[in-house]
Image (spheres, grey):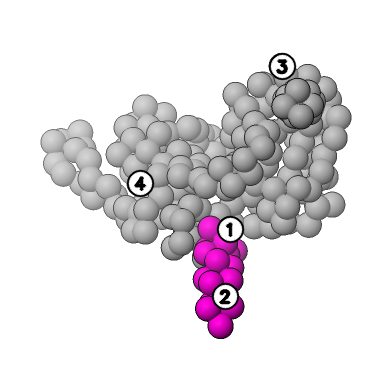
Amino acid sequence: MQKEVKVQSVNWSSAVICMVLGANPPMAVFEGFIKRVWGHLGIAQISRMTMRLTMVKFNDEATRDQVLEDGILHFDRKPVIIRPWSADLSAICLVRSVLLWIRLPDLGLQYWGSKCLSALVSTLGKPIMVDKFTRDRSRIQFASVLVEMEVTDNPPRNIQFLNEFGQIMEQEVEYEWLPIKCKACSGFGHAEMECRKELKAKWVKKELHLKRR
């Protein structure tokens, strides 16, 4: 049995599991999105595993590794969590850090350089990239930066920094979108009523109640 399990695991070694945080798009819509983004790499199979998880199998592990290294992917401006295939699907659902687009409204144009923006948002998390409108200064109401950060119940709404005159400035922070946080397991991307841990606990309590009766 162990030998067969090992063989089957190797069969899925070139696959990744995808989950859109904060959304559950129809399979046909998400499959079309995956084919547009990764179709040129060579996809062997796309299958919906659960209500929230979609498996994408590539032709080889090298392609899978390339997808994992690229990492940054958004569906409807919501982050797509990408993980290598694992038998433990519950571990994939427990997301502790996410990629978030943050806005810095009314930020002085003198601070729109890539190094300045990275320094400003580094107190929130790891800066990844700016969007096209920020890069070419075609929309100057706010700067938009993609940041990898751990989301808490109360994410920072402002940051402080020293300007070029040595003065302490306070900059407002807006989040384009924040993921749902589960109160039962502290994971992100699902509500308490959808949590496997919570559902399992309720079933256990129900079984104990029936036995006592």
> Quadrant where the C terminus lies?
bottom right
Q: Are marks 3 and 2 in contact (CB under 8 Å)?
A: no
Query: What separation in Å lies between label 4 and label 1 (alpha carbons)?
Result: 42 Å
Q: Which residue is mark 1?
A: 196
At numbered mark 1, what does the secondary structure look like: helix, strand or loop?
A: helix
- Nearest to viewer (mark 4 / mark 1): 1
Mark 4 and mark 2 residues within 8 Å of each other at the beta carbon: no
Q: Earlier in the sequence, mark 4 or mark 1?
A: 4
* Left or right for 115, reference 213: left
- Number of residues whose C-alpha sits closer than 10 Å to that of mark 3, classed few (under 14), some (14–19) or many (20 or more): few
Foreground disc of the pair 3, 1:
1
Which quadrant of the figure contains the N terminus? top right
Task: Indicate the amino acid at tag 1.
Answer: Arg
Q: Earlier in the sequence, mark 4 or mark 2?
A: 4
Type of residue at label 2?
Lys
- What crowding class fits label 2: few (fewer than 14 Cα within 10 Å), some (14-19), or many (20 or more)? few
The CA span between labels 4 and 2 is: 63 Å
Few, some or many residues within 10 Å of mark 1 (<14, 14–19, 20+): some
For residue 110, which quarter of the picture? top left
Which label sits in the foreground, 1 or 2?
2
* Secondary structure under the numbered disc 2 in the rendered image: helix
* Residue type at numbered disc 4: Leu
Mark 1 vs mark 2, CA separation in Å? 22 Å
Are the two marked residues, 1 and 2, in contact with CB atoms closer than 8 angstroms? Answer: no
For disc 4, the marked residue is: 107
- Mark 4 → mark 3, Cα distance in angstroms: 42 Å
Q: Earlier in the sequence, mark 1 or mark 2?
A: 1
Q: Which residue is mark 3?
A: 62
**Disc ID at residue 211:** 2
Residue drawn at 22 percent across, 40 percent down: 161
